[in-house]
């Protein structure tokens, strides 16, 4: 951003920043959720979730099969990865648009927003922590490096983004786990999908054999795959902010001190779209590994899985899970929407402060 607006940025309180971020997260979650569903379905299918006949599905020997996801008349063979399937079954997803078409036809149009309540429950506190903390960390680090180590100032967005994302990720991870599971597994048309709390209970009590109180000691399962999440989100944030800040400053620098809400919106959306796309492409395999670990239904196996072994499993099936680049198509618009809305609201709040003072 321009130097004038960057300096005024420090005048906003944490509550004002959090409010701006929560609004940005709400808007992004509603708009981008269908792309998120497509991304998760494609990655889960490649990892072994049977959206189609099992005989054509690469197997990771997971426990992710749900009965309502099998083809009519299909019965799993006890000692084989192959099983017969009705001839009319052709539910394998072939791409993002194919996911949209088949989800709409088989489960209903509103299922494209499957997990939106979890997305909102996740995005609003996560972005509410992430964006304000990034601003605060960036401002503090820039002030320190400018005075003591000017050569490190260009790297401030990298460190500030990584630190802020780690804090937000650890704080809100159980809801992220529930959201991924809600989006990954199909629900028959007319069936009532489980909510966030019921999905989380299913993580600690998958067999419904014990009471809730007896299962609470297994709450550590709610952080299953946290390492994979951090290994994706920290590099993503580092790449994203390191790319976004120079692009944004260059665009706003062309406008000068006469920046308006429209130019702030355009500059931030453009910079966010480019940065999000590049960061999404760079971290796509790690995103697949995160999804793969989060959809594992066997709690004991899930605890033993590591990001490294998950990535190696994907490599052994000739990179099947790495061909799912729908995350790249989702990351660009998502970052663009969040950053532009967040900065425009901050710009409006700053103007309001100037007018009232």
Image: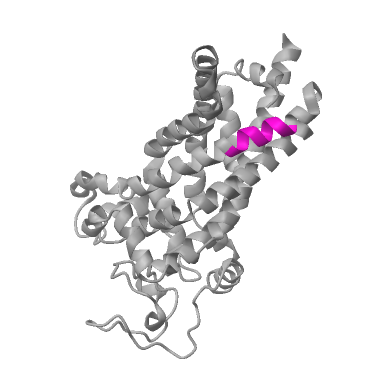
Q: Is residue 351 above or below residue 25?
A: above
Q: In this view, does 129 lie above or below 323?
A: above
Residue 188 x %, y %: 46, 71
- Majority SS type along the magenta span: helix
Residue shown at 60% from the left, 71% from the top: 101
Residue 285 x %, y %: 44, 56
Magenta stretch containing residue 247, yes or no?
Answer: yes
Residue 191 in view in this figure: yes
Magenta stretch containing residue 126, yes or no?
Answer: no
Q: Is residue 138 left or right of residue 199?
A: right
Residue at the front extreme, as displayed: 151
The quarter of the picture where the C terminus appears is top right
The quarter of the picture where the N terminus appears is top right
| Near-viewer residue (155 or 165) | 155
Residue 112 x %, y %: 56, 61
Query: Which stretch did the figure color magenta?
Result: 243-251
Figure label count: 0
Residue 30 in view in this figure: no
Residue shown at 61% from the left, 49% from the top: 332
Q: Quadrant of residue 299?
A: bottom left
């Amino acid at each position: 951003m321009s130097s004038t607006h960057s300096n005024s940025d420090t005048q906003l309180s944490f509550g004002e920043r959090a409010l701006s971020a929560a609004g940005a997260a709400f808007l992004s979650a509603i708009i981008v959720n269908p792309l998120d569903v497509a991304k998760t379905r494609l990655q889960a299918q490649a990892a072994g979730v049977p959206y189609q006949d099992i005989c054509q599905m690469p197997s990771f020997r997971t426990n992710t099969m749900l009965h309502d996801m099998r083809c009519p008349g299909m019965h799993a063979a006890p000692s084989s990865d192959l099983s017969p399937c009705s001839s009319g079954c052709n539910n394998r997803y072939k791409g993002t648009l194919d996911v949209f078409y088949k989800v709409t036809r088989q489960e209903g149009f509103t299922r494209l927003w499957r997990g939106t309540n979890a997305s909102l429950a996740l995005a609003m506190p996560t972005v509410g922590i992430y964006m304000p903390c990034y601003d605060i960390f960036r401002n503090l680090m820039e002030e320190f490096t400018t005075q003591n180590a000017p050569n490190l100032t260009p790297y401030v967005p990298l460190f500030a983004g990584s630190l802020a994302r780690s804090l937000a990720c650890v704080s809100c991870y159980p809801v992220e786990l529930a959201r991924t599971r809600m989006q990954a597994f199909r629900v028959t048309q007319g069936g009532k999908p489980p909510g966030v709390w019921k999905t989380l209970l299913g993580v600690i009590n998958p067999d419904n054999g014990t009471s809730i109180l007896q299962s609470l000691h297994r709450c550590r399962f709610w952080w299953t795959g946290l390492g994979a999440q951090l290994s994706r989100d920290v590099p993503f944030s580092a790449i994203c902010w390191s790319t976004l800040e120079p692009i944004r400053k260059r665009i706003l620098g062309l406008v000068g001190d006469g920046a308006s809400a429209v130019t702030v919106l355009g500059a931030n959306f453009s910079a966010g779209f480019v940065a999000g796309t590049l960061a999404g492409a760079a971290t796509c395999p790690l995103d697949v590994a995160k999804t793969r670990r989060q959809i594992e239904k066997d709690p004991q196996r899930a605890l033993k899985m590591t990001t490294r072994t998950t990535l190696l499993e994907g490599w052994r099936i000739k990179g099947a899970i790495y061909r799912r680049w729908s995350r790249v198509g989702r990351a660009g618009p998502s970052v663009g929407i969040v950053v532009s809305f967040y900065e425009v609201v901050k710009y409006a709040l700053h103007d309001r402060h100037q007018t009232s003072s």
